[in-house]
């Protein structure tokens, strides 16, 4: 084994992920993504960022954008990402992302980009605004990942196509210009719960649901949370078991399990001789308890403007240093003088 190989084996692996600042995170974002990001901090070098450049692909009022980017950053810290342990930053504060995104878009086949499901979905949803940014979104995302030489990228199922695209672009670059980028892999944690709508449990819980009763936002207060769980759609069997066809109950059990760590069988036993009313109260209470410290930390962060500003600035500086190194290397290889 060579020295470089040995160093490669003992190197702490790099995790990177981003989230768009398009509204308060849901319980789905938290249990499916951000909570796991927090745990990964213990074993990996972690980079997490607010993907504000990606959010530009859909129109939003400037004032709202400003507020949402700041809030998303504060939410990441409130959820337990520690700026001392991880690198937390806002994408647009690191100009290398936009530069790398452009360079990689010149290696992105039109055909591949047109096959992206997210592009097709969003074009359908916003037929009045099918812009070039929406189309080249995957090249920008590839840049995000490759700039930091990420080993693993935790993403939901909807993003795996973009990750494959990233690997393809990286491999193409390496083939044409010589070994430059590390090819990232997806990271799918066992504990990553998929949370469904409380009102329509066959659909994913989403930030943009128009029915407010369907979604738990991580800043909801205890009363609101309990009320939403009370009105959650279940079935008429009055039986707390995880079984096909019981989408509503399965969802509540998944949430309860993700928070308490209890396996499904234990949950079924716990509520064997109780009704759905008791079960819903138990799930609501567990969720409210889990989210309380996040809500409190978030309020404290927003109240401390100086601290938040400094954390944002420091994140940008540290991220820039790393990103600039990779960008310089890629430019050199491509022949940009
Ligand atoms: P989005 O809100 O679609 O920008 O997603 C941000 C992150 O949260 C991604 O990693 C998603 O996979 C994850 N996520 C979003 N909604 C859910 C959900 N209902 N259940 C689990 N994970 C989710
Ligand atoms: N496209 C991702 C989403 O919508 C957000 C994102 C942007 C991202 N750049 C990334 C995720 C890089 C992981 C890595 O959820």
Image (tube, rainbow, N blue to C red):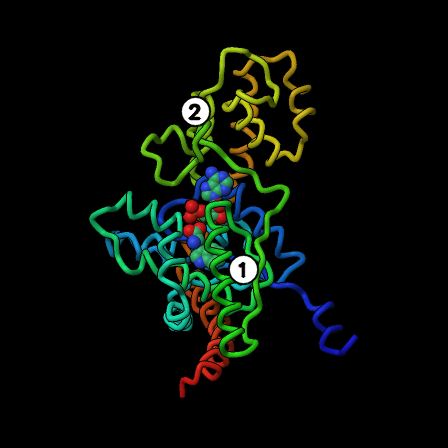
| Whether residue 316 is situated above or below residue 194 in the rendered picture | below
Residue that label 2 marks: 227
As drawn, which residue projects farthest toward the bottom? 337
Instruction: Determine which quarter of the picture holds residue 211.
Output: top left
Name the secondary structure under disc 2: helix
| Whether residue 298 is situated above or below residue 88 in the rendered picture | above
Q: Is mark 1 within 8 Å of ligand 2?
A: yes
Q: CA distance from mark 1 to mark 2?
A: 36 Å
| Whether residue 109 is situated above or below residue 260 in the rendered picture | below
Please report the residue visible at 67 percent of the width from the left and 65 percent of the height from the top.
12
| Whether residue 187 is situated above or below residue 320 in the rendered picture | above
Residue 218 visible, this orientation: no
* Label 1, residues with CA under 10 Å away: few <14, some 14-19, many ≥20: many
Instruction: Determine which quarter of the picture holds residue 65.
Output: bottom left
Q: Give the image location of residue 304, x and y in percent.
A: 42, 57
Answer with left or right where residue 231 lies relative to residue 81: left
Please report the residue visible at 58 percent of the width from the left and 27 percent of the height from the top.
253
Please report the residue visible at 50 percent of the width from the left and 80 percent of the height from the top.
329
Question: Quarter of the image containing the C terminus?
Answer: bottom left
Sequence-first disc among 1 and 2: 1
Q: Nearer the viewer, mark 1 or mark 2?
A: 1
Residue that label 1 marks: 16
Q: Give the image location of residue 213, x and y in percent.
A: 38, 28
Answer with left or right where residue 102 lies relative to residue 126: right
Work out whether residue 292 or residue 76 is closer to the camera in this orientation and state it: 76
Work out whether residue 121 or residue 207 is closer to the camera in this orientation and state it: 121
Q: Quadrant of ligand 2?
A: bottom left
Q: Is mark 2 within 8 Å of ligand 1?
A: no
Question: Quarter of the image containing the N terminus?
Answer: bottom right
Work out whether residue 289 or residue 44 is closer to the camera in this orientation and state it: 44
């Amino acid at each position: 084994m060579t020295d470089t190989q040995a160093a490669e084996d003992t190197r702490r692996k790099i995790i990177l992920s981003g989230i768009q600042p398009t509204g308060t995170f849901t319980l789905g974002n938290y249990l499916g993504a951000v909570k796991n990001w927090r745990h990964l901090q213990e074993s990996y070098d972690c980079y997490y960022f607010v993907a504000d450049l990606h959010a530009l692909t859909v129109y939003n009022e400037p004032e709202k954008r400003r507020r949402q980017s700041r809030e998303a950053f504060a939410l990441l810290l409130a959820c337990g990402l520690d700026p001392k342990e991880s690198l937390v930053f806002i994408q647009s504060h690191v100009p290398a992302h936009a530069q790398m995104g452009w360079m990689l878009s010149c290696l992105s086949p039109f055909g591949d980009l047109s096959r992206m499901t997210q592009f097709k979905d969003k074009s359908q949803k916003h037929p009045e605004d099918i812009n070039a940014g929406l189309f080249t979104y995957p090249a920008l995302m590839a840049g995000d990942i490759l700039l930091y030489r990420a080993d693993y990228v935790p993403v939901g199922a909807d993003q795996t196509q973009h990750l494959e695209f990233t690997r393809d672009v990286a491999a193409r670059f390496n083939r044409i210009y010589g070994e430059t980028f590390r090819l990232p892999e997806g990271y799918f944690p066992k504990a990553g719960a998929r949370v469904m709508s409380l009102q329509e449990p066959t659909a994913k819980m989403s930030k943009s649901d128009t029915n407010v009763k369907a979604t738990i936002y991580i800043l909801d207060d205890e009363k609101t949370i309990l009320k939403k769980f009370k009105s959650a759609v279940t079935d008429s069997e009055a039986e707390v078991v995880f079984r096909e066809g019981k989408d509503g109950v399965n969802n509540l059990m998944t949430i309860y399990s993700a928070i308490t760590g209890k396996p499904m069988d234990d949950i079924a036993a716990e509520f064997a001789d109780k009704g759905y009313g008791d079960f819903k109260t138990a799930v609501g209470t567990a969720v409210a308890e889990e989210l309380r410290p996040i809500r409190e930390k978030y309020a404290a962060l927003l109240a401390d403007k100086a601290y938040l500003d400094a954390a944002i600035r420091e994140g940008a500086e540290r991220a820039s240093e790393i990103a600039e190194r990779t960008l310089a290397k890629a430019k050199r290889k491509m022949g940009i003088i």
